[in-house]
Image: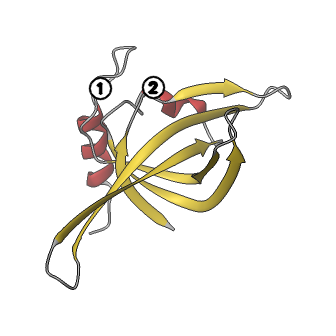
Amino acid sequence: MNITGRLTRDAQVHTTPKDKQVVNFSVAVNDRYRNKQGQRIEQTTFFDCSYWISSKVAAILTKGTLVELTGRVSARAWTGNDGEAHAGLNFHTSGIKLHGGGKKAKDGNASNTKQAKETEDNLPF
């Protein structure tokens, strides 16, 4: 499955008790359509994403960056401390394409736009 959206916050790297690193980030996916009455409907879906392949990608996954993700979706439900029922969507990411729009990487690397351009240059079409 593919989703395209913008990061809602900078990615964070977490280390598991078994010394595996995972990159966690959140993506907002916007959908716009017209209902039967002709009204324009805008809907945003939020995904909590995880990426286990390389923690180095966290440096370029910054708030506002437009990304296209490949992976699988899972749903989760829980009861909060206040007794309220909650639900959320997880996206287990296996591939990331950058389309730019974020801020510069903190370590002085090239901007997301340049990296996205390099990615686009390698596309077969």
Q: In which quarter of the image is the C terminus?
A: bottom left
- Identity of the amino acid at label 1? Ala
Helix, strand or loop at label 2? It is helix
What secondary structure is found at the residue carrying circle 1? loop
**In the rendered picture of this protein, how many numbered marks are placed on residues?**
2
Q: Nearer the viewer, residue 66 or 125?
A: 66
Spatial CA span between label 2 and label 1: 11 Å
> Mark 2 or 1 closer to N-term?
2
Q: Position of residue 27 (x, y in %)?
A: 43, 45
Q: Position of residue 29 (x, y in %)?
A: 36, 55
Instruction: Kindly give the residue lying farthest to the right in the view shown.
Output: 18
What residue is rendered at 40% in x and 14% in y? 107
104 w.r.t. 125: above or below:
above
Disc number for residue 110? 1
Q: Position of residue 100 (x, y in %)?
A: 26, 41
Please tell me which residue is depicted at 66% across the width and 26% down the height of the picture.
Answer: 14
Q: Name the residue under label 2.
A: 59
